[in-house]
Amino acid sequence: MRAMVLHGPGRPLAATEMARPEPAAGQVLVEVAACGVCRTDLHVCDGELAHPKLPLIPGHEIVGRVAAAGAGAERFAVGDRVGIPWLGFTCGECGFCRSGRENLCDRPKFTGYTLDGGYAEFCLADQRYVFPLHGGYSDVEAAPLLCAGLIGYRSLRLAGEARRLGLYGFGAAAHIVAQVARHQGREVFAFTRADDAAGQAFARDLGAAWVGASTALPPEPLDAAIIFAPVGALVPAALRATAKGGTVVCAGIHMSDIPGFAYADLWQERSIRSVANLTRRDGEEFLALAPQVPVRTATQSFPLAEANAALAALREGRITGAAVLTMR
Ligand SMILES: [Zn+2]
Ligand SMILES: [Zn+2]
């Protein structure tokens, strides 16, 4: 099979021909049709996340069809369309797993980070962490739902009952969250880089009530803000845009350092929190909700062999919506 392989941080992915893996007990082998390119992939490839599996096949927004199953893996039939997300394994035994917080498991494995992922024609997965994917979305359209969508959804849930919701960074996750938030009757305030006219127009198209630069103050204070851009300076900026009692949710896995700020910006019961990973329940809930909204994903496709170009385009902010690799 063909795969794009990371051999070390900061190095481009290498196009590689390798043997198709065999599913072990409890695993399914999935023939990949499409795999989303997530900002987390950039953090892995750039060495901002410590200790990836090496060599590594990145990618954790995987849509494909079951091609084979290992012993005892009877949850899916050959040919079933499935999605493979970031959460690839949890121990089931630690205090976090036992209290419904498997996203915080002490001994987790993550697809495209500590397990090989979907920048390849085939991918193995533990069948317990795989989602069935029903109709309504093409393979390319479905790919961004598997991380941008479901971790975005978790971020939105942790933002609480906010009626006026700020989204900082209007990329793959925000474009999905904006649609869900509008569906829930919230007002969306989109913050982008000051010079990002395309991003601002995109946010307006998706129903944002107000669009502006990330350093600007919105016309009314926000009840909550979600920060998708990996920029620590946005945390105090978002706090200053947020009303008393408001929450600032940091949705990314990595962020530059947060600069110091006045206690007055946090005072009046404002809070800052991060969002880590997903639970299988998040995935089930979001994948059921998405077609009801209905969430429409904007995608830009690249052939597998152009994974480095897709990563570069994402790094440089040249993607509107979500980048997706296709295998044929
Ligand atoms: Zn655990
Ligand atoms: Zn992701």
Image (cartoon, grey):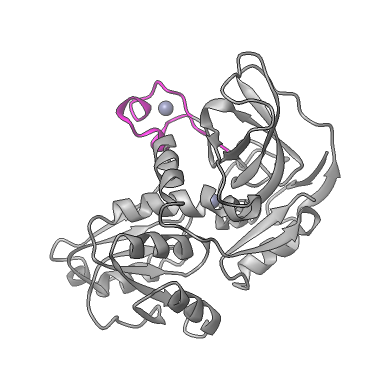
Task: Specify the quadrant of the image occupied by residue 242.
Answer: bottom left
Residue 94 covered by magenta stretch: yes
Q: Is residue 39 above or below residue 287?
A: below
**Residue 224 placement, left or right of 106:** left
Which stretch is magenta?
90-110
Q: Position of residue 86 (x, y in %)?
A: 54, 42
Residue 272 covered by magenta stretch: no
Q: Quadrant of ligand 1?
A: top left
The quarter of the picture where the N terminus appears is top right
Task: Specify the quadrant of the image occupied by residue 227.
Answer: bottom left
Instruction: Residue at 62%, 67% (x, y): give it.
Output: 315
Q: Position of residue 216 (x, y in %)?
A: 34, 83
Q: Position of residue 97 (x, y in %)?
A: 37, 28
**Residue 237 placement, left or right of 80:** left
**Residue 118 placement, left or right of 145:** right
- Residue 256 visible in image: no
**Residue 295 placement, left or right of 110:** left
